[in-house]
Amino acid sequence: MEIQSLWQIKWGQKGESSTQKKALRYLAAFLALMVLCTLLSGAADALTLARIKTEAIRPMSLKHDTSLSGTLSPKYEQAVFTLPDQKVSSVQVKEGDMVKEGDILFQVDLEELEEQLERARDELKKAEYQQKDTNSAGALEAKEKQKAEARAREDYDHTLEEADRKIREAEAAWADAQARLDIIRDKTVTPETDADAGQGYTQEQKQQDINSLEQETDARKQDYDAAVAEKEEKMRNAGRQVEDASSPSPSNHSNAIAELDQKEIERRIQKLEQLKEDGGAVRSTMDGVVKKLETATGQITSSTMAALLTDTSNGYRFEAAASKNEIKYLAVGDEVTLDFGDQYEPVSGLRIESIEAAGEDSDQSLISLDVPPQKEKLPSTAELKASRTTKKYTAVVPVEALRVEKGKYFLYMPSEKESVLGKITVVERVDVEILDKNDQYAAVEGAFLESNEVLVHSNKTVNTGDRVRKEES
């Protein structure tokens, strides 16, 4: 029965109570109010719910673009040197000039060059005199050493002869005393025949003689032992003197050093003379371009490079330093392109030739590749650009869909549920692991919901379980 008909109901029986009619009308009014509140509640709910945009999870490959800044230099470079301490009188080229082999780069002052040449010749004469003095001193020293060695050997022989003589004399005296002692010991004792005349050889006399000769014999033996000991001491000292005199002289390379110094001066003179003969001109050693010029008019040359010439006919060498994370998607043999900005055409079809660590403890790597010769001269800097496409992943989502909390990544996915108001849409949290990603998309894995859609954008902050309203794309 329509609500409006409740107001127009007609009662068939007379006498029905007017109270019953009022009740029915009130009921109809209540129902109408409930419908109106429901409509207003639904409208209000629609206005307060977060509106979200979603995208489907889909299988796809990821594209990784790499861009590195580096330097470009000719593959062949050659430094030009000249003699140091030369005053530059004029410069004939500037950086960037094309030169041919033999072209004059700059000239040095001839007057200063002549003075240096004279000083070098004087140094050579001085070195020659010093070498002669050194040779003379060396010869004299060798002669004195030979004389000292001869004298030491002569002293040794004389000491040996004298010591042996003393030993022989001491040994003879000792033997003589021993012989006389033996004679007395063997001598026969005779009785006294005439006491007044002192005739005969008594035992007492014999014993006195034995005692005296034994003392003499011991003394002669001590003299012999002393002579032997003296010989040993004197021969030891004489031997040391011979050893000291005949020992080799300490190493002395002063003569050899003097010869090397002399040769160095001779080479310098030769170079100065050659520079003088060429009028003080310093010339290009190859066909190429003057990349650097390290001298100017009025300056004094040094032993370092005076100019740097480059030859681009053999191409260029590109090098770039980058962290290991920056070259994650680069490998030797990958095809790359070098971009030089708007004023130059890019060079494509190049291949990475090497990727090497910049140092043992460094996180940097050095990427190198060759660039073939070009029609026009290339700038010194370039941008390496490369692209790599990965395998096809089963689940890829936009990076905007990723949420992170305490280091863990998750997605919000819409899910429909039944409620007293009918079907409603809420968001559920799904934790995921990132397999790979670029600036736009991320390959993930996790326990996905059946909806296969992820929340990408919301006009309000949402949390797990919040009701949302999907916007039609």
Image: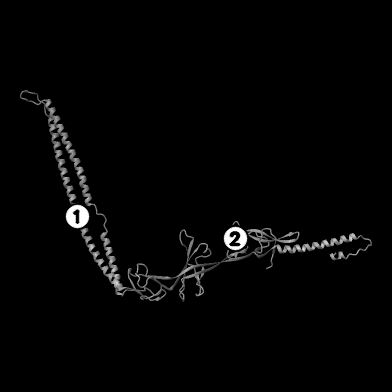
Task: Name the mark on residue 338.
Answer: none
Find residue 190 and report its horizontal and vertical position in percent.
9, 25
**CA separation, marks 1 and 2?**
91 Å
Looking at this view, name the residue that lies furthest to the left.
197
The total number of labels drawn is: 2
Which of disc 2 and disc 1 is earlier in sequence?
A: 1
In-image side of 224 versus 10 (left or right): left
- Residue 223, position as x, y percentages in the image: 16, 37
244 is higher (above) or lower (below) than 342: above
The answer to which of 227 and 441 lies nearer the viewer is 441
Task: Assess disc 1: are there few (<14), some (14-19) or many (≥20) residues with their C-alpha within 10 Å of its C-alpha.
Answer: few
Task: Determine the image quadrant of residue 146.
Answer: bottom left
- Mark 2 neighbour density, 10 Å: few (under 14) some (14–19) many (20 or more): some
Between 344 and 197, the residue placed more toward the observer is: 344
* Residue 184 occupies quadrant: top left
- At horizontal 18% and vertical 52% (from top left) the residue drawn is 150
> At label 2, which amino acid type do we have?
Ile
Q: Looking at numbered disc 1 in the image, what kind of residue is underneath it?
A: Glu
Report the residue marked by disc 2: 434
Residue that numbered label 1 is attached to: 144
Q: Report whether 196 appears left or right of 229.
A: left
> Which quadrant holds the N terminus?
bottom right
Q: Quadrant of residue 179?
A: top left
